[in-house]
Amino acid sequence: MLVLVASYFFYGLWDWRFLFLIFASTLVDYLVGIAIDNNNENLKRKKAWLWVSVIFNIGLLGFFKYYNFFADSFIDMFQLFGYNITSTWTLNIILPVGISFYTFQTMSYSLDIYYNRLKPSKDFLSFATFVAFFPQLVAGPIERATDLLGQISSKRVFSQNQIIEGLKLILWGLFKKMVIADALAPMVDDIFTNYSTYPASTLILGVTLFSFQVYGDFSGYSDIAIGTSKLFGIELMSNFKFPNFSRNVAEYWQRWHISLSTWFRHYIYIPLGGSRVSKLKSVRNICIIFLVSGFWHGANWTFIFWGAFHALAFVPVFLLGRNAIYKDSVVAENSFFPSFVEIGQLLLTFAIVTFSRIFFRSESLTDAFGYISRIGSDMSYAPYQHPLGYRMTDYFILVLLFVLYEFRMRRDERSPFKFKNKYVRFAAYTLVIFAILLFYDSGFDRSFIYFQF
């Protein structure tokens, strides 16, 4: 009960009015889950109740997140044919924070009951806590009831080791957010805002820094969420497993935003036939998944193009049968350094993913293609000056040290301070805390990037 109250209080601090939305989503899926189970022998009614959950949650998401997108796109389509329609249909709607996450989480509960993977909960307070659990409420990981609900319902025992592990993850997450992501944000914002005035070298630098920024920001939040949950005796799934060390695009998606990729695989890709159907249908399924993933991220054509780009990059890997070859391994598996082949694979994958982020970061398709066009038309070099006058060399060294440190811990994303020597561990804690204090700026907007989704 205390965790539920804390979760609702946490969410209400942003805007108390949207507490009614999360409560409505909770109540609908709680009742739907029971109704689906009660109609287990009647497939027609069972499916009808499932559609209640899907339509309600997608309807919430559609209205608050996508209504204006569809209205504007409809108007733009008519204007292409010469009809001048005034945009009077759009609404001034505030996007509820975390709505994309908790609607998918509640839907997964009803879907798991429908597929007989789970029995419905009769404990409304536990179920409401599962939906609103504050560490992962606003930006994931998106947890399935089969993994999280049982932990919430059962009695938990205090574990000193779990508390220590949680505090370590929180510290490492704060470092990734405040020292890596927030430090790079002013440069990324400057370059993407004024891309038309910069040469290709600066634009390549800008999108490269954004790759590290969004990774530090989102994976940092996930580490904080996982660490905070450990303080309550709850284990969340890993959401990131060092995606920057992926050897092809398929491995990247096995390591980036794992909870969302898993959700799409279980509830869309596999029901569509997955890879058990013909190659042509499998390619269709892959394209659907990536387009839906892009649309899930935001009501903007830039995200749809971002998803389409990843589909185009993933399909060749799938057709060559290389989409699962790195599933159970890490780069430089049995050596300290990667081989030359692996280095080439890492660089190529990072380049492909980073290029796609031009669409992810741009405000519009016009800006995205303008950014790309500028890279191709002005292939010159000029040293970039930090917008606040800081030395760029310091940031390059910071990113390089961060990459090397993560490469060292690439086998275990849950142990950021895994050193046998206690003095080395203490030095690592000290340096990380010092860096956080050094980079902290109370006047800087430190919102997490994925809060907007």
Image (spheres, rainbow, N blue to C red):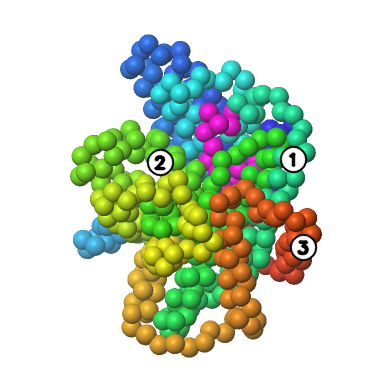
The residue type indicated by label 3 comes to: Ala
| Quadrant (top left, top right, bottom left, bottom right) of the N terminus | top right
Disc nearer the start of the sequence (1/3): 1
Residue 93, labelled with which disc? none
Q: How far from the left and from the top, in percent, is residue 426? A: 78, 59
How many residues crowd around disc 3 within 10 Å: few (fewer than 14), some, or many (20 or more)?
few
Instruction: Work out whether 127 lies above or below 269.
Output: above
Residue 427, labelled with which disc? 3
Residue pointed to by mark 1? 161
The residue type indicated by label 2 comes to: Phe
Q: Are marks 2 and 3 in contact (CB under 8 Å)?
A: no
Residue drawn at x 37%, y 79% as measured from the top left: 374
Residue drawn at x 77%, y 63% as measured from the top left: 427
Q: How far from the left and from the top, in percent, is residue 126? A: 64, 26
Disc nearer the start of the sequence (2/3): 2
Q: Is residue 126 left or right of residue 315?
A: right
Disc nearer the start of the sequence (2/1): 1
How many residues crowd around disc 2 within 10 Å: few (fewer than 14), some, or many (20 or more)?
some
Q: How far from the left and from the top, in percent, is residue 323? A: 34, 49
Q: Is residue 176 magenta?
A: no
Q: Quadrant of residue 77?
A: bottom left
Instruction: Work out whether 427 lies above or below 328.
Output: below
Over which residues does the magenta segment extend? 134-149
Residue pointed to by mark 2? 264
Q: CA distance from mark 2 to mark 3?
A: 41 Å
Residue drawn at x 31%, y 46% as measured from the top left: 286
Q: Give the SS element for disc 3.
A: helix
Residue 265 vs residue 243, the one in the foreground: 243
